[in-house]
Image: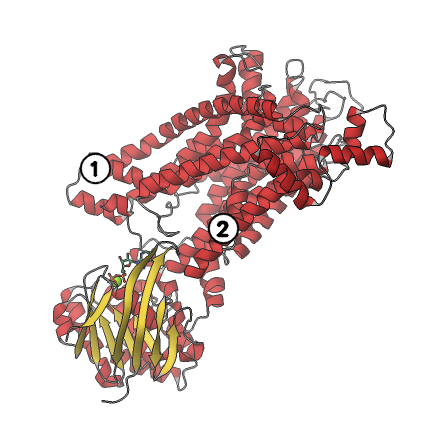
């Protein structure tokens, strides 16, 4: 136990140092010669002679290897100097600070919305706990809220409330009325997720035996409900931290859609201009915010639990009863619709410009034409392949990585924490700034952020499975550790992981689409759902169908994947519920005292 | 007195983090001799299960080591060698926890015999073990989930005994059972040293049961001492 603790610490330190070095050395990592682009941007009259480039290199502080560059940048940061923009030549610090201020306000408002949404979702669960009625986890409302990603929701809000209804201004950052739509678009998915996690944790905590004991001992609602809430909150407080960090990432798309001059838009601008000092400043601000949120979450957990607990000692949420007629029906209908779109659209040509610009839908052109006069049905169908296939590859890769890494839990703790705290858009922004925007880069960015949740889930599940008495005592029957893992732990853990992976498929497809939407993924003229939506939304007033076709498909995929996840839950064998097979669970000290 | 079957030399346990280790068991020394039964008593949370799991080699000790027949069985940072696993076997507190829940009892025991490389005719061994544990042989064909608590505990004893261990460690084997069942089970357990010639380490919080053992070790807040 001692050496494993040391390994976890070493892993964290290495991951942290690695991250610091990489951030500092971003200009070096960049594939193109920055000196050349700066030379072109600033001194267009100069010939790009070797001498001229060398002098620009020296001016930019680009001499030496990655470590020298990184060390120089960090020493600048410690002196409060974030460097000069490669584009404008002026210091990047003030602009970044302004953007941070805007984003902090937006994030606080979004957290407020998130808490309201979560409270509404959790209220029925709490009522059931208080009345000692059978407690089920969160219901379909939470699922529905998390199904749509921020960029889709924000686009929908923009179109509905700003363009058609004109209740709110469509863009800008001039007062509360410009902040409401963005904050709601950010807060709803986050609140849905938080409400679901908390609801499931509450259901799990309310089923622990100490609750029955307290009830039998005559404890009142006023005593039991806060204790259950505290116990449940302790188990989701870390995730709440991650959700808030995720908000920072979601804010990139939302800020872009509503033209809010926050950190996300700042980063996106830096990536598009390949202005690496500005990118570094933005990433540093994001990382700083993530660290602050992580520390707050850690402090909250300590306070809730009254001390550090070994991993795996907090009850896992019970599995919700899944799989009803509705899910089957939804899944079947959704797949049929998608297949219909594919069958009808794949034979058509997504690139030919043969129709009128923004031609309205008709029998021959069911989805209408886009702004260049291309067949939207064909583009949506081909876009399905371009989005879903990479997403599936990412899911499978992430599960495989998670299962392998689950067997060296302490060594991967640091990378998991670092990667876990990276919103996909941020990874996408950095990769695009370094290597230019490509589908492969977007997929790598999404994989980088998709493996950690699966890996840490795998680590927790494996620890829990190993603690089950009949697994713990297996060595007495001569079962070797390797076999304990492969025959007794992995089979118990794999269905849950596969289910988790399927649950994440829409998120992953939508993360890819979101990068495409921001111009960080597949490039035109390739059809990709995010791009299609971005291309269509500019014409939403004149030709709503150009937005509706890709948006409807994205919503359809979200619905299918959510239904698939709940179907899978009902079909796979679950460990039996009788007491003797459950790992021993004791209430946290702070609760039982 | 003859040489002990099992010797615990300064075995201790800690959990928590490296910076803030919490001691679950202070270094303890004791010995078990062939044919004797030794009770381990103490309040809940005193460290009895921790002690039992270390002796069984299921949990790594943080200090010390365990000798069986004078040879190192397990110790700090070392799990027992596969070839010596059969020497120390156990009966858990949870009825049926030592048996995979979805495998018939007989199949589990056969697999354990094969894995541990126990010589001899498996079915004869299983029959004898079921007899020792007073388990109705018909129940061997059931899965642990279809056994009652007492039956599952007898199956667990049969599984442990079938391997032919020199030491059997039972961790509160009767605490989940009703009085009548637990009395029958206690008789079966306490008869083990006489019938098999091995040693029995019986963790219990039942003083009456402890009184029937040859010696008693008391665990108080992780400190082990012989009280009788
Ligand atoms: N890995 C662990 N994590 C947390 N607490 C532990 C761990 N191992 C032992 N303990 C603690 O050590 C004490 C002794 O546990 P145990 O040996 O199970 O007691 P007993 O069997 O006597 O009731 C308990 O307070 C228990 O909570
Ligand atoms: Mg115990």
Q: Residues within 10 Å of mark 2 (few under 14, many from 20)?
A: many
Q: Which mark is residue A490?
A: none
Colour option used: secondary structure
Could one spot residue A137 in this view of the protein? no
Task: Indicate whether A544 appears above or below A75.
Answer: above
Q: Quadrant of residue A25?
A: top right
How many angstroms separate mark 2 from mark 1 (CA)? 36 Å
A373 lies left or right of A143: right
Residue identified by numbered label 1: A223
Q: Residue B45: image x %, image y %?
A: 23, 59
Q: Residue A421: image x %, image y %?
A: 52, 40
Task: Indicate whether A216 appears above or below A367.
Answer: below
Residue identified by numbered label 2: A413
- The quarter of the image holding the N terminus of chain A is bottom left
Q: Nearer the viewer, residue B131 or A1?
A: A1
Element on which disc 1 rests: helix
Q: Chain letter for mark 1, please.
A: A
A582 lies left or right of A28: left
Q: Residue at x 38, y 74 (%)?
A: B74
Residue at the outermost front position: A79
């Amino acid at each position: 136990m001692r050496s494993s603790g040391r390994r976890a610490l070493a892993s964290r330190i290495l991951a942290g140092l690695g991250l610091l070095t990489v951030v500092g050395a971003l200009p070096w990592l960049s594939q193109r010669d920055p000196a050349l682009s700066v030379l072109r941007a600033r001194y267009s009259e100069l010939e790009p002679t070797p001498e001229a480039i060398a002098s620009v290199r020296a001016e930019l502080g680009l001499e030496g290897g990655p470590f020298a560059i990184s060390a120089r940048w960090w020493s600048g940061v410690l002196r409060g100097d974030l460097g000069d923009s490669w584009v404008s030549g002026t210091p990047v610090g003030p602009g970044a600070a302004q953007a941070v201020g805007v984003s902090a306000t937006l994030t606080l408002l979004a957290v407020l919305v998130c808490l309201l949404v979560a409270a509404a979702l959790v209220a029925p669960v709490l009522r059931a706990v208080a009345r000692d009625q059978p407690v089920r986890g969160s219901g379909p409302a939470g699922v529905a809220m998390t199904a749509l990603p921020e960029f889709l929701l924000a686009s929908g809000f923009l179109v509905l409330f700003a363009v058609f209804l004109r209740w709110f201004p469509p863009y800008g950052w001039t007062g509360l009325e410009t902040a409401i739509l963005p904050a709601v678009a950010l807060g709803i998915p986050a609140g849905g997720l938080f409400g679901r996690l908390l609801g499931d944790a509450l259901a799990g905590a309310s089923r622990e035996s100490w609750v029955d004991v307290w009830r039998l001992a005559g404890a009142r609602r006023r005593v039991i409900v806060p204790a259950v809430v505290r116990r449940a909150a302790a188990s989701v407080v870390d995730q709440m931290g991650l959700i808030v960090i995720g908000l920072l990432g979601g804010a990139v798309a939302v800020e872009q859609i509503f033209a809010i001059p926050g950190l996300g838009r700042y980063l996106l601008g830096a990536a598009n201009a390949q202005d690496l000092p500005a990118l570094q400043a933005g990433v540093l601000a994001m990382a700083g915010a993530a660290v602050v949120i992580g520390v707050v979450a850690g402090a909250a957990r300590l306070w809730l639990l009254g001390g550090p607990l070994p991993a795996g000692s907090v009850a896992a949420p019970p599995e919700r009863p899944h799989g009803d007629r509705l899910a089957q029906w939804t899944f079947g209908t959704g797949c049929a619709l998608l297949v219909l779109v594919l069958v009808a659209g794949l034979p058509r040509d997504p690139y030919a410009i043969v129709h009128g610009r923004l031609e309205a839908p008709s029998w021959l052109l069911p989805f209408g034409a886009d702004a260049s006069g291309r067949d939207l049905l064909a583009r949506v169908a081909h876009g399905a392949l371009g989005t879903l296939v990479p997403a599936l590859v990412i899911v499978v890769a992430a599960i495989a990585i998670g299962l392998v890494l689950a067997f060296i839990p302490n060594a991967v703790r640091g990378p998991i924490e670092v990667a876990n705290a990276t919103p996909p858009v941020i990874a996408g922004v950095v990769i695009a700034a370094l290597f230019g925007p490509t589908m492969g880069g977007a997929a790598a960015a999404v994989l980088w952020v998709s493996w950690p949740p699966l890996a840490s889930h795998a680590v927790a599940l494996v620890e829990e499975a190993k603690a089950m008495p009949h697994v713990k005592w297996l060595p007495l029957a001569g079962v070797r550790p390797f076999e304990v893992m492969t025959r007794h732990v992995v089979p118990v853990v794999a269905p849950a992981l596969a289910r988790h992976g399927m649950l994440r498929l829409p998120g992953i497809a939508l993360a890819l689409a979101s990068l495409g939407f921001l111009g960080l993924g597949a490039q035109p003229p390739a059809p990709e759902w995010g791009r299609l939506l971005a291309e269509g939304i500019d014409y939403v007033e004149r030709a709503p169908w150009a937005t509706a076709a890709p948006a409807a498909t994205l919503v359809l995929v979200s619905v299918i994947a959510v239904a698939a996840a709940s179907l899978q839950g009902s079909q796979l064998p679950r460990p039996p519920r009788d007491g003797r097979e459950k790992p021993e669970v004791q209430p946290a000290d702070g609760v039982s005292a | 007195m003859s040489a002990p079957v099992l010797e615990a030399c300064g075995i201790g346990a800690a959990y928590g983090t490296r910076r803030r280790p919490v001691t679950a068991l202070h270094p303890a020394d004791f010995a078990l001799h062939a044919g004797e039964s030794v009770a381990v008593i103490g309040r809940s949370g005193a460290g009895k299960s921790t002690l039992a799991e270390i002796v069984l080699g299921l949990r790594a000790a943080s200090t010390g080591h365990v000798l069986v027949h004078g040879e190192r069985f397990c110790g700090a940072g070392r799990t027992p060698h596969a070839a010596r696993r059969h020497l120390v076997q156990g009966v858990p507190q949870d009825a049926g926890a030592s048996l995979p829940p979805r495998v018939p009892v007989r199949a589990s025991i056969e697999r354990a015999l094969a894995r541990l490389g126990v010589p001899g005719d498996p079915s004869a061994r299983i029959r004898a073990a079921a007899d020792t544990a007073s388990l109705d042989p018909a129940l061997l064909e059931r899965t642990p989930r279809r056994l009652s608590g007492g039956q599952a505990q007898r199956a667990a004893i049969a599984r442990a005994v079938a391997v032919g261990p020199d030491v059997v460690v039972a961790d509160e084997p009767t605490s989940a059972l009703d009085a009548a069942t637990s009395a029958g089970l206690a008789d079966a357990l306490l008869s083990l040293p006489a019938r098999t010639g091995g040693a029995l380490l019986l963790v219990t919080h039942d003083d009456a049961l402890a009184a029937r053992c040859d010696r008693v070790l008391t665990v108080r807040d992780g400190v082990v001492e012989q009280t009788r």
